Image: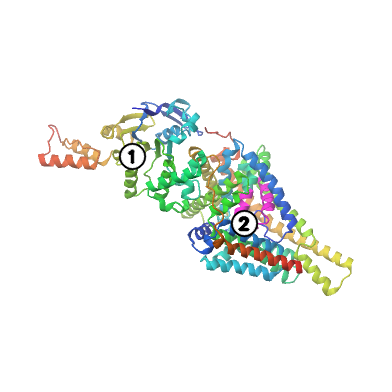
């Protein structure tokens, strides 16, 4: 997996509502841009690429149930505006079939959309001095690092909030059982919180780094293939605009 | 995700004739929304279990295989596990709460999509989304089926041409990556043809016809009541905590 | 007779630099005609159709449909043309059958009540009313093709364009499709233009045949005239219908028995010849 699908009920309400609001702003702006020609022509491509990202999760490219998503490759093809909409559509559909949290669709859209947009930006930057395969692989790797960093940052924000998490339950139980002083209780709460964030971040980075490497290699192979067969798909040749 | 998850849920939703299938999409969306809201608000593991069991029971009555749905909806469990490991304090309540929330929410949504054909769900959602996003929802869902078929054929072709061998994982990785690249190009070509077809057929912004979202109190009252009831219980429990 | 389509000496260059020249004879369709376009693979049949429906713009030459250049003004004539492309599945855009058949009139802005009436009428005409609420993805190949046809006919077009309409159909479905198209032609004066490899079907649903190859439009005539051109067809890699091939082989054996290209007509000729005795030509082998 390139990034974690945050399940429902883990993050505080204010965080995922804020995420939804921010995502809504981006989606609205992207939708306005997409609705103007020639962007409107890209609706089928956007939909097909979003479908591709969903379908690719089911391919047995890596045995053992590891799912890849090729978000960076999709971003290279779509560009930032269409990428935001595609990210939203993918996350909404995944949530509806139980493969992601519905409340965190906004946050997941921000994470995935950022990864896709970063893939597009980085590929354009790298291809000026790297071969397409290397540019694609490097762009995918860094885009996933960015996406994962964003995800850890969001979860950190969530874990840092007091009173919204199971953590508070534990603190309440601890306070009731041991009657710690107020200051000691707050210190205990803070150290427990920091331990949780660190533990979570380490876990994600261990799992993530394996995923980044694997998916970068796969992305490089795919970008090289596309560059040879249909270079305009990854912006390497002028696009033929039909009638 | 299994490539069959989407296809089988679509089949269940379109082939069923139960009271839940006949209820309007708005009522079932409200039910799912009520369940998810309750999941988010509550810290009561028993309520989460009750929501989960209610969904499974509804599916059983609707003749949708509940075990299969539970399997599909268990996907978030892995990611919930990561959060549990990250936050575990040695008590059983924390993992129960995290798992319970993830599973109850996912099962609520799968119950919706397993008993409501996707055009009706998307038709309702499209009313609240930017137009192009609503259109993209329909086209993407349709495209998933087409690409799943294509992907299946491609994997089969790779296998029969000895492109997948147990002892050569790196070769497998390369071959399947190439097949995936081919799939992407097919998808692109298909999308070009799809646009041409839309133009020829006069597309001006309306893929699906507007749906009737409310079927009447006789069929819609129960789902709405269940969702509202779960939410009310969650609020009451939280208020009294 | 009113001319509704003319394609004259067009040249098109594809993105991969492939050039297609369709010179030679002009392709003309008059109102009420049923026109078959036959030819080898890669000859330009689909390219010609795509120019007619405005998907491609010719770099040279003339394409005129209902008096306009379709690549520039397709919107003016869109409602007068129905299109069924080679892959019916690709043509089905909307989720359910009713959604898909109503796609064009809804997008043209017809009132909902009128749209419903149009859809019900065409579903009834094609005997697929029972499919109205089904999701397109789950239909059989033949059903999808019928739904695609319904979507093309819903606005009662004057011209129907079909790209390989019989591909993938079993024999029964093929004849069902032929009967349906002939019925529509007879009832509604529908002009039909289609491409096909199924030369045996062409005589059943064509008034004129155009042979299109890489060298352009090289022959035009009735089905009987076209399929009598054994050497020409052989040269361009086209097979003759079975009955025409039979007549040719009989001629080689010294039996002069010109056969019509329709089975019923050919059977009458053979029966008559058998009763009278076949005439053996002077130098026959």
Q: Is residue C47 above or below residue B142?
A: above
Disc ID at residue C187: 1
Helix, strand or loop at label 1? It is helix
Q: Which of marks 1 and 2 is in front?
A: 1
- Numbered disc 2: what chain? A
* Quarter of the rendering occupied by the N terminus of chain C: top left
Helix, strand or loop at label 2? It is helix
Residue B56 on image: x %, y %: 58, 67
> Could you tell me which residue is drawn at 41 percent across and 39 percent down?
C156
Q: Nearer the viewer, residue A160 or C80?
A: C80
Q: Are marks 1 and 2 on the same chain?
A: no
Where on the picture, by quarter, is residue B118?
A: bottom right
Q: Nearer the viewer, residue A77 or C221?
A: C221
Residue B17 on image: x %, y %: 49, 62
Tag 1 near tag 2, CB within 8 Å: no
Q: Is the magenta stretch mostly helix, strand or loop?
A: helix
Q: Can residue C145 be seen in this view?
A: no
> Could you tell me which residue is drawn at 17 percent across and 41 percent down?
C270
Residue C26 on image: x %, y %: 37, 26
A89 inside magenta stretch: yes
Classed neighbour count for the residue bearing mark 2: other residues with Cα under 10 Å, few (<14), some (14–19), many (≥20): many
Where on the picture, by quarter, is residue A241?
A: top right
Classed neighbour count for the residue bearing mark 1: other residues with Cα under 10 Å, few (<14), some (14–19), many (≥20): few
Q: Which of C142 and B150 is in front in this view?
A: C142
A73 inside magenta stretch: no
Tag 2 residue: A95
State which region is magenta. A87-116
Q: Answer left or right for C169 relative to A116.
A: left
Residue B228 on image: x %, y %: 65, 63
Q: Answer left or right for A184 relative to A108.
A: right
Q: Is residue C44 above or below residue A156?
A: above
């Amino acid at each position: 997996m390139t990034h974690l699908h945050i399940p429902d009920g883990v993050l505080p309400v204010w965080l995922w509502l804020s995420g939804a609001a921010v995502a809504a702003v981006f989606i609205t702006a992207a939708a306005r841009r997409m609705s103007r020609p020639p962007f409107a022509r890209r609706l089928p491509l956007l939909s097909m690429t979003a479908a591709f990202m969903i379908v690719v999760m089911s391919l047995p490219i890596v045995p053992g149930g590891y799912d890849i998503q090729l978000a960076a490759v999709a971003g290279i093809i779509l560009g930032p505006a269409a990428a935001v909409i595609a990210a939203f559509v993918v996350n909404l559909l995944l949530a509806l079939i139980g493969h992601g949290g519905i409340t965190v669709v906004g946050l997941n859209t921000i994470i995935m959309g950022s990864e896709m947009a970063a893939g597009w930006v980085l590929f354009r930057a790298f291809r000026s001095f790297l071969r397409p395969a290397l540019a694609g692989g490097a762009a995918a790797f860094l885009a996933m690092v960015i996406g994962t960093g964003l995800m850890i940052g969001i979860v950190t924000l969530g874990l840092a909030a007091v009173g919204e998490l199971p953590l508070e339950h534990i603190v309440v139980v601890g306070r009731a059982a041991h009657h710690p002083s107020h200051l000691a209780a707050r210190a205990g709460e803070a150290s427990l919180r920091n331990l949780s964030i660190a533990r979570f971040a380490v876990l994600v980075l261990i799992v993530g780094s394996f995923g980044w490497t694997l998916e970068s290699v796969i992305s490089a192979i795919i970008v090289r293939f596309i560059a040879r067969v249909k270079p305009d798909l990854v912006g390497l040749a002028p696009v033929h605009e039909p009638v | 995700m299994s490539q069959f998850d989407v296809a089988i849920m679509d089949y269940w939703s379109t082939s069923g004739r139960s009271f839940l299938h006949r209820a309007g999409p708005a009522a079932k969306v409200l039910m799912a929304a009520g369940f998810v809201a309750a999941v988010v608000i509550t810290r009561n593991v028993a309520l989460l279990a009750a929501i989960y069991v209610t969904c499974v029971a509804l599916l059983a009555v609707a003749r949708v295989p509940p075990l299969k749905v539970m399997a599909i909806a268990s996907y978030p469990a892995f990611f919930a596990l990561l959060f549990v490991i990250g936050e575990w304090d040695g008590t059983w309540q924390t993992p129960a709460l995290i798992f319970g929330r993830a599973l109850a929410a996912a099962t609520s949504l799968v119950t919706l999509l397993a008993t409501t054909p996707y055009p009706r769900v998307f038709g309702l959602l499209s009313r609240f989304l930017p137009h192009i996003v609503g259109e993209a929802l329909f086209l993407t869902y349709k495209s998933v089926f087409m690409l799943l078929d294509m992907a299946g054929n491609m994997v089969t072709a790779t296998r029969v041409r000895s492109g997948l061998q147990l002892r050569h994982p790196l070769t497998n990785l390369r071959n399947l990556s190439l097949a995936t690249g081919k799939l992407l190009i097919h998808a692109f070509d298909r999308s070009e043809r799809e646009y041409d077809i839309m133009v020829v057929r006069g597309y001006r912004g309306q893929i699906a016809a507007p749906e009737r979202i409310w079927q009447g109190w006789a069929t819609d009252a129960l789902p709405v009541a269940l969702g509202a009831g779960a939410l009310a219980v969650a609020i009451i429990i939280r208020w009294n905590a | 007779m009113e001319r509704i389509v003319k394609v004259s000496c067009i040249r098109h260059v594809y993105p991969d630099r492939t050039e297609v020249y369709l010179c030679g004879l002009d392709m003309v369709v008059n109102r009420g005609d049923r026109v078959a376009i036959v030819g080898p693979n890669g000859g330009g049949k689909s390219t010609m159709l795509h120019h007619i429906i405005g998907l491609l713009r010719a770099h040279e030459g003339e394409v005129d449909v209902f008096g306009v250049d379709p690549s520039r003004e397709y919107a003016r004539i869109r409602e007068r043309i129905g299109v069924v492309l080679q892959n019916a599945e690709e043509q089905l855009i909307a989720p359910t059958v009713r959604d898909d058949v109503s796609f064009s009139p809804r997008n043209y802005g017809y009132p909902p009540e009128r749209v419903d009436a149009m859809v019900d009428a065409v579903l009834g005409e094609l005997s697929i009313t029972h499919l109205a609420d089904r999701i397109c993805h789950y239909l059989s190949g033949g059903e999808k093709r019928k739904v695609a046809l319904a979507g093309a006919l819903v606005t009662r077009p004057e011209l129907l364009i079909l790209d390989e309409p019989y591909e993938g159909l079993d024999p029964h479905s093929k004849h069902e499709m032929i009967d349906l198209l002939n019925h529509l032609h007879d009832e509604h004066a529908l002009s039909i233009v289609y491409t096909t490899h199924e030369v045996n079907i062409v005589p059943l649903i064509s008034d004129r045949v155009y042979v299109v190859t890489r060298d352009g439009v090289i022959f035009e005539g009735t089905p009987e005239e076209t399929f009598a051109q054994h050497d020409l067809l052989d040269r361009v890699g086209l097979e003759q219908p079975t009955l025409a091939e039979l007549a040719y082989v009989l001629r080689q054996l010294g039996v002069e028995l010109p056969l019509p290209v329709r089975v019923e007509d050919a059977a009458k000729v053979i029966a008559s010849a058998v009763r009278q005795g076949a005439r053996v030509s002077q130098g026959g082998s």
